[in-house]
Amino acid sequence: MVGGGPAGLALALGLAGDGHEVVVLEQSPRFDRSFRGESLSPDGVWLLDRLGVLDTVVERGALVVERLEIAENGRVVMSADFADYPYAQRYPMEIPQPTLLAALAEAGAAYPGFDLRQGAKVTALTEEDGDVTGVRYRGADGEERELRARLVVGADGRYSKTRELSGLAYDKQPLERDVVWLRMPRPDGWQRACYRIRLQGSRHGLFIPTYPDDIRIGFNIPKGGLKELRKGGIEQLHRRIDEIAPELSQGLRESVTGWSGTTVLDIFTVATPEWSRPGLTLMGDAAHTLTPILGQGVNHALIDGHTLAGLLDRPLRATGRRGSELIRTATLRFQHQREEAVRISRGLQMRQERAFTYDNQLAVAGRSALYRIMNRSRYLQKRVLCSAYFQLQPELAR
Ligand SMILES: Cc1cc2nc3c(=O)[nH]c(=O)nc-3n(C[C@H](O)[C@H](O)[C@H](O)COP(=O)(O)OP(=O)(O)OC[C@H]3O[C@@H](n4cnc5c(N)ncnc54)[C@H](O)[C@@H]3O)c2cc1C
């Protein structure tokens, strides 16, 4: 595995649990990342339970989210209550990535075949007769090394080096806007367990409850617009948020006093027509980068890992040429099984992103009306939310 993010670690845990030998090469020496996807959909939570790590992450600190609320010009136009959904895991969760990754790595370390090498950066692929046979990497001690593998898995995220090295074609589509992320304490009067989306013309903000008792705020700026925003000083950022969430004004000024507390996410999607070639497959963000809308990235990464582990178990037991053929078939099947769900998420995100950018009055009124209709129609609400949140779990009998 190139990359020990949610995708690579979920796959490694699954394979090691089935008795296989896996090496995860992760360039970062630690799991201490911030401003990464922390939102797990109910399906993602369900999967963590199946992977045997849910109890650990809950013990170490995670937030259960009970509601989603969309407000337009200060008025709530849609509100969904996750309690209404008949699934074993019906609530999304906010789990800091360091907690999630450490829990997956610890669970993996319980198996003898699991080998996580942190501080190991992959720099090249090795090939023989057109098949990928392994990688070259620089270890934590600075030494260059080579590692042979029956399958190299590029799970190295949105800027995937493996994707680049593999020569697999991909289509990167920048969106019109980027997102600035920042974090502040939850204000009094804001219910903790609620996702909030605030819309005002073509501006929008996401307000996400964050463990232990903060909120992450993501708000849109024009593509590459950070320079312009920064020209006005930090006060300009405060004013931008005042426009969509005036009640945060004081707390925001107290807690976000400089740009160091912010980060910009360059928003683009990546679609890769072929996820694999002999000896190599891509997965997670490396195969299909999504946008932050409805927190889908981590979920797809985990589901990819779990799915691929299941498909590889038998092929990895076969040896020689037959084994290589079976592994190749498994990677093709993997794409076939996963790409429809990714396509649905991408479509949903792009539709939402388009709706968020409306700036003429008529379109904005139409958007508001649509959210209000959804608010009254359980059927429509379910259709939209189920396609983002409930694809894996069986529905419970009522
Ligand atoms: C700033 C930011 C904010 C985000 N916000 C959200 C959000 O709100 N909701 C959401 O759902 N998603 C969000 N995402 C996306 C989410 O984090 C990803 O979809 C998810 O983590 C994908 O998992 P992954 O395992 O495929 O890749 P990643 O989590 O990116 O993991 C890839 C790993 O590969 C390692 N790596 C990279 N190159 C190499 C190399 N050459 N050698 C060895 N290791 C390497 C990296 O260090 C990293 O640990 C955000 C991402 C960013 C960057």
Image (cartoon, rainbow, N blue to C red):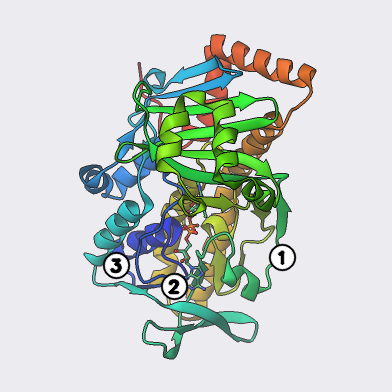
Determine whether label 1 and label 3 are within 8 Å by CB: no
Given the image, on which type of amino acid does mark 3 rest?
Gly
Q: Which residue was labeled with disc 3?
A: 19
Q: How far is mark 1 from mark 3, CA to CA?
A: 33 Å
Question: In this rendering, would 208 be left or right of 53?
Answer: right
Residue 40 shows in this picture: no
Task: Using the image, determine if residue 238 lies above or below residue 142.
Answer: above
Q: How far is mark 1 from mark 2, CA to CA?
A: 24 Å
Q: Quadrant of residue 254?
A: top left
Question: In this rendering, would 98 be left or right of 236?
Answer: left
Q: Which residue was labeled with disc 2?
A: 27
Determine whether label 1 and label 2 are within 8 Å by CB: no
Decide which of 205, 46 is in the foreground and name it: 205
Q: Is mark 3 within 8 Å of ligand 1?
A: no
Q: Which residue was labeled with disc 1?
A: 169
Task: Using the image, determine if residue 398 lies above or below residue 139.
Answer: above
Residue 112 shows in this picture: yes
Kindly state the secondary structure of the residue where label 2 is placed.
loop
Residue 311, image x, y percentages: 45, 58
Q: Quadrant of residue 348?
A: top right
